[in-house]
Image (cartoon, grey):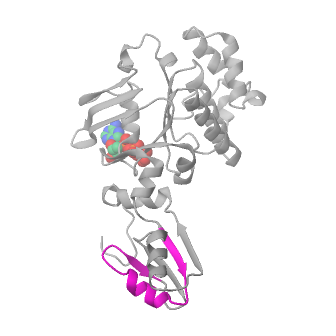
Amino acid sequence: MIEVHQLTKRYGDKTAVDGLTFTVEPGTVTGFLGPNGAGKSTTMRLITGLDSPTAGHARVNGKRYADFAAPLREVGVLLEARAVHAGRSAHHHLRALAHTHGIPRSRVDEVIGMVGLREVARQRAGKFSLGMGQRLGIAVALLADPATVLLDEPVNGLDPEGVLWVRRLLTSLAAEGRTVLLSSHLMSEMAQTAEHLVIIGRGRLLADTTVDRFVREAGLGTVKVVSPGAALLAELLRGPGVEITGEGHGTLQVAGADAELIGTTAARHGIPVYELTPHAASLEDAFMELTRESVEYPAAAQGVAV
Ligand SMILES: Nc1ncnc2c1ncn2[C@@H]1O[C@H](COP(=O)(O)OP(=O)(O)OP(=O)(O)O)[C@@H](O)[C@H]1O
């Protein structure tokens, strides 16, 4: 389990992490989301002892990272891929790490196989593609078979097969009862991999919830209605919080009312309905809605004063 309590990190005038409190439970993949500059990498660095907090603390399984006798065995970390000596081979790099941490050599071959680098394990890592570098970084994180895994943008540079592989790997690590914290800007990927979400903006906690609940509670879903009585139905449905578009072609897009309410209203007034199709919002829609105010570097919208 990862516990972050009132964690704060200031760099001069800049508060990168601001009184952050959350817990990452074992057994599920937790997605760590936030716009650029929100403080995700800083938080991960604080959890893994690469930086020290200005205030508050972060603990893994009840201990500060610095207090672990063999941290690699407790927490596997992928923060910056390619932090490998370019002249070394993947095999050499992993063997050196295994040697200094008392990990058996057989485990090196095992993780090389797990991450799919067997063919290139003896080549210099400096020649690796971005995706191969990511795979090596993941191999390092898993080398000591840790119970907690933190991965910052692990699918960065991976091809679709690689992305699918990371997804399966992370879900299986969580299913084994491990604690998995994953950051990624790829919302569709996050929606398929993570079960739980911690979302931050400008260093502060914005949401700590499940993916399903987060998307549902964003209330951005719409219902498509096809009816010869569309205009009358729209009139009946209109009210506070209900937004209706697309009238005039017998088709309505209704936001703020669910299919049950729409169907019941139509039935009560004897209006025939040919189609009633709910469209759930995506994680991306819900994320954009939540973080609209917290975007550190907003893109200037064309023709709109910002
Ligand atoms: N060493 C540092 N010195 C000064 N400011 C820093 C330092 N590290 C991070 N920051 C600032 O702290 C804020 C949070 O940065 P961080 O890299 O943690 O965000 P992030 O959520 O990981 O962003 P991204 O999604 O772009 O990777 C940013 O404004 C960044 O410029």
Answer with the quadrant where ligand 1 appears in the image.
Answer: top left
Q: Residue furthest right?
A: 119
Where residue 153 appears, x then y in whole percent? 52, 42
Q: Is residue 97 visible?
A: yes
Residue 116: quadrant of the picture: top right
Residue displayed at 43% across by 85% down:
234
Q: Nearer the viewer, residue 95 or 267?
A: 267
What is the quadrant of the C terminus in the image?
bottom left
Q: Nearer the viewer, residue 177 or 166?
A: 177
Image side of residue 34 versus residue 87, left or right: left
Residue displayed at 39% across by 26% down:
50
What is the quadrant of the N terminus in the image?
top left
Q: Does 101 appear above or below 161?
A: above
- Tell me where the magenta segment starts and ends, as one range: 222-245
Residue displayed at 64% across by 15% down:
95
Where residue 165 appears, x then y in whole percent? 67, 39
Q: Nearer the viewer, residue 276 or 7?
A: 276
